[in-house]
Amino acid sequence: MDIKRFVYQRKRLGYSQVALSKGICTQSTLSKFESNGQVPSLTILAQLCDRLGLTIDDLSKDNTSSIRYMRSLLNQIELALMIEHFPQAVSNLKKIRLEELKSPQDRMQYYYLKGMIYTLTNNNASTSLFNFTKILDELDEQHRTIFSPLAYLGSGILYARQNSMEHADFFFSKVIAFLRSKADEDLAGVDRNYYLRIVTMMYYAAEYHSLNKRLEVSNQVLEATIKICASNHVTYFLPRIKLLEANNAIELGENSKKIRRLLTEAEVFARFNKNNVVEVQVAALLNNFDKTISNK
């Protein structure tokens, strides 16, 4: 039983022992639980946890069936996708038991991640779309959570990779409209997952603009994305951002000094974040770049 988490949450919400226990149990019962680990009845503990916005499951330590463990896995999967550690993401996804995920938020995160894994690893397209559709047509039918634009994003990436650009345009237009609606939003102090998802959408939007030869627009989006990453001290996306900037610079015919600098930055950030995918791509580009320069 993770009593420290319970105490931390009580203090974070500003409850004294007297205030928290009022109407549920005696202050002495609560004190014995926090100080000596004497667990009260499940009925009392459930009421105390509910008042703190917790569940008894949240206090379970090292319990692979606990919702806390499942949420931790979901967040690990999301991070693995950001740094392109696909085998790790696939491995952790297999540990998730969907039947254990009771809240719509957790289920939406699961379906989003499963859909993205299938999309980014070029797996079964119909399975990818099924997962995104579960969000859009069932769990977030009113499209009020961030998981709807994320599902649009996954669908857009999928269709772009299949070269079905009309379908891709449809979904990316929704993602871009969402990002524009959030353009003036202050991301300082917001939930970590929230701004990482915003950054995810911005990166793929920039990639999509680049794919459609809107290189200046792509660079503008990348510049805005870098600012968010810098203000929140996030480096996960910088390898891919710098690589895309380098590719855009090559397409725009920028000078060799700038291109080499961007490729070097991409390589450094890739090593720092252990992003082997970007490292390999940068090595290939540098090799071709050096050959091109030497032949001039």
Image (cartoon, rainbow, N blue to C red):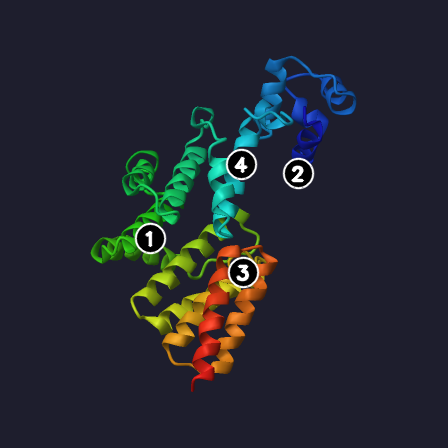
Q: CA distance from mark 1 to mark 2?
A: 40 Å
Q: Which corner quadrant holds the N terminus?
A: top right
Q: Of all residues shown, which one is farthest toward the left?
A: 166
Q: Can residue 137 be seen in the rendering of this structure?
A: yes
Check contact, mark 1 vs mark 3: CB within 8 A. Answer: no
Query: Would you name the residue on which mark 2 appears?
Result: 12
Q: State the count of labels.
A: 4
* Front: mark 3 or 2: 3
Q: Is residue 257 left or right of residue 9?
A: left
Q: Position of residue 222 (x, y in %)?
A: 44, 66
Q: CA distance from mark 3 to mark 2?
A: 27 Å
Check contact, mark 1 vs mark 2: CB within 8 A. Answer: no
Q: Is residue 204 left or right of residue 278?
A: left
**Counting residues from the N terminus, which is met first, the one under dot 4 or under dot 3?**
4
Q: Residues within 10 Å of mark 1 (few under 14, many from 20)?
A: many
* Front: mark 2 or 4: 4
**Counting residues from the N terminus, which is met first, the one under dot 3 or under dot 2?**
2
Check contact, mark 2 vs mark 4: CB within 8 A. Answer: no
Query: Would you name the residue on which mark 3 appears?
Result: 229
Q: Position of residue 108 (x, y in %)?
A: 40, 37
Q: CA distance from mark 1 to mark 3?
A: 22 Å
Query: Would you name the residue on which mark 4 appears?
Result: 73
Q: What's the amino acid at mark 4?
A: Leu
Q: Quadrant of residue 219?
A: bottom left
Secondary structure beneath disc 1?
helix
Q: Is residue 113 left or right of residue 155?
A: right
Q: Quadrant of residue 142?
A: top left
Q: Residues within 10 Å of mark 4 (few under 14, many from 20)?
A: some
Residue ID at (32%, 35%): 134
Q: What's the amino acid at mark 1?
A: Ile
Q: What's the amino acid at mark 2?
A: Arg
Q: Is residue 288 above or below residue 128?
A: below
